[in-house]
Amino acid sequence: NDGLALPLVVLFAALAAGGPGDGTAYWLEFVGGQIVLGPLAGIAIGYSGGRLVALAAAMQHFTLPCLLFSIFALTVMRMAPIAISLAGLKLGAHTVAFIGWFGPRGLASVLFLLIVMQSTDLARESELLAAVALTVTLSIILHGVTAAPWARIYGRAAGNGTVSTDST
């Protein structure tokens, strides 16, 4: 399991290099938290996501407008605020696009939906639920498929100096 490999490597490295006052206790505590909390968070997120999809009324509300909204949410609605927030940093366009695509995502949509659903009585609640479920599902698929190749391309370009992290 990739989620356990790195914490275990750090754990063994901390134990091998251990000595009084060298921070070994910190690394042991950190790794312990990663090994315990990481899988628990994964289980909770997976369960919540599964329930969200199941609640979408067997996909009967996954319509073309729902799909178009999901695509809009993953591109313009998500990337534009990130680009605006990064404007003052003078980052290059490639860097802003990369951060916009792979930047903050995920549980915020689900949490905001749950807050809205608990605080109001929506007439078209199942359609909203379907839109969020489809957006999160597309996000998982699209970001998962593009992560490795785009990171390699961006890393190569940054190493060659063809991607500027500074717009000047």
Image (cartoon, rainbow, N blue to C red):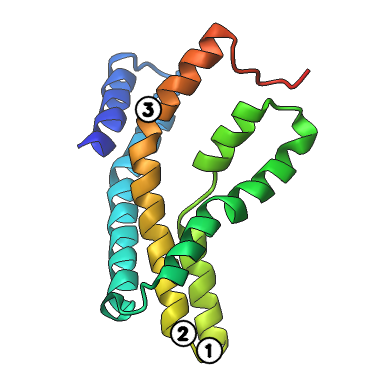
* Residue under numbered circle 1: 122
| Residue 111 placement (x, y as % from top left) | 50, 68
Do the numbered discs 2 and 1 sit on residues whose CB atoms are within 8 Å?
A: yes
Residue occupying the point 52% across, 41% down? 101
- Quarter containing the N terminus: top left
Q: Nearer the viewer, residue 8 or 46?
A: 46
Dot 1 falls on a residue whose secondary structure is loop
Do the numbered discs 1 and 3 sit on residues whose CB atoms are within 8 Å?
A: no
121 relative position to 153: left or right: right
- Toward which corner of the image does residue 12 lie, by quadrant? top left
Name which residue type carries label 2.
Glu
Name which residue type carries label 3.
Pro
| Residue 152 placement (x, y as % from top left) | 41, 21
Position of residue 111 relative to residue 22, above or below, is: below
Q: Residue furthest front?
A: 64
Q: Residues within 10 Å of mark 3 (few under 14, many from 20)?
A: few
Q: Nearer the viewer, residue 125 or 24?
A: 125
Q: Residues within 10 Å of mark 2 (few under 14, many from 20)?
A: some
* Residue under numbered circle 2: 125
Q: Nearer the viewer, residue 110 or 90?
A: 90
Dot 3 falls on a residue whose secondary structure is helix
Residue 40 shows up from this direction? yes
Instruction: Give me the disc on residue 149.
Output: 3
Do the numbered discs 2 and 3 sit on residues whose CB atoms are within 8 Å?
A: no
Decide which of tag 2 and tag 3 comes sooner along the chain.
2
| Residue 65 placement (x, y as % from top left) | 47, 71
Residue occupying the point 38% across, 36% down? 146
Q: Residues within 10 Å of mark 1 (few under 14, many from 20)?
A: few
Name which residue type carries label 1.
Leu
| Residue 115 placement (x, y as % from top left) | 54, 76
